[in-house]
Image (cartoon, rainbow, N blue to C red):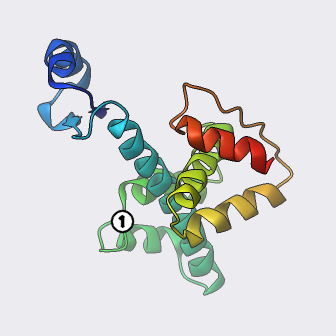
């Protein structure tokens, strides 16, 4: 299990034994500088990339199918090429087998997109991918109620901005 942690040095030293035991291999335990909350920002970025990789993998496989390619052969080639990713290798086999068993909750993915969008806007950054993903999710028949509270990664100033935005 990957563990991303941040905080002051005293807290991290006290938690190190437990975090090390939970993470297994030392390579799975990551400390992020920046104090409490910095690890939440890294986690949010990781979730954003995971979602983008899944969406890109699905679009790439659909493109290959439309071009008349053998999608299993395409998968075998891409998973070991520069265009491959862990999410590609992990999620595409289910796509090829038409296994639509959910591997994560859509509401969590939407919450992460909303959080990333709020932080981007708050920081005056432009994010085409996040905005495009949110627009696509809004058009799907699946509706998720995203409840923002202190357990989410969104800082309070962004929560108030989102509430005002509606």
- Please count the marks in the image: 1
Residues packed near mark 1 inside 10 Å, few (<14), some (14 to 19) or many (20 plus): some
- Residue 109: x percent and y percent? 60, 45
Pick the residue in front: 47 or 98: 47
- Residue sitting at 49 percent across and 59 percent down? 123
- Residue sitting at 21 percent across and 40 percent down? 33
Residue that numbered label 1 is attached to: 79
Q: Is residue 70 left or right of residue 65?
A: left
- Residue 59: x percent and y percent? 60, 71
In this view, 163 is above or below 77: above
Pick the residue in front: 14 or 48: 14
Q: Looking at the figure, which quarter contains the N terminus?
A: top left
Q: State which quadrant residue 145 falls in.
A: top right
Q: Would residue 29 be visible to someone looking at this image?
A: yes
* Secondary element type, mark 1: loop
In this view, 110 is above or below 21: below
- Residue sitting at 34 percent across and 39 percent down? 38
Q: State which quadrant residue 28 falls in.
A: top left
Pick the residue in front: 44 or 91: 44
Residue sitting farthest toward the bottom: 67
- Residue 65: x percent and y percent? 61, 77
In this view, 94 is above or below 33: below
- Residue sitting at 20 percent across and 35 percent down? 31
Q: Would residue 103 be visible to someone looking at this image?
A: no
- Residue 57: x percent and y percent? 52, 65
In this view, 118 is above or below 124: above
Residue sitting farthest toward the right: 141
Q: Is residue 77 left or right of residue 61?
A: left
Pick the residue in front: 17 or 88: 17
């Amino acid at each position: 299990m990957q563990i991303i942690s941040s905080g002051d040095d005293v807290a991290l030293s006290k938690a190190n034994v437990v975090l090390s035991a939970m993470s297994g291999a030392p390579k799975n335990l990551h400390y992020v500088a920046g104090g409490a909350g910095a690890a939440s920002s890294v986690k949010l970025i990781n979730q954003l990339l995971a979602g983008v990789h899944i969406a890109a993998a699905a679009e790439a496989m659909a493109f290959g199918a439309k071009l008349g390619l053998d999608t299993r052969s395409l998968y075998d080639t891409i998973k070991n090429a520069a265009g491959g990713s862990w999410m590609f290798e992990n999620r595409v086999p289910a796509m090829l087998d038409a296994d639509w068993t959910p591997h994560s909750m859509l509401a969590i993915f939407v919450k992460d997109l909303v959080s990333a969008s709020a932080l981007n806007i708050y920081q005056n950054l432009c994010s085409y991918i996040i905005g495009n993903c949110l627009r696509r999710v809004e058009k799907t028949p699946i509706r998720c109620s995203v409840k923002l509270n202190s357990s989410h990664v969104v800082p309070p100033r962004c929560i108030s901005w989102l509430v005002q935005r509606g």
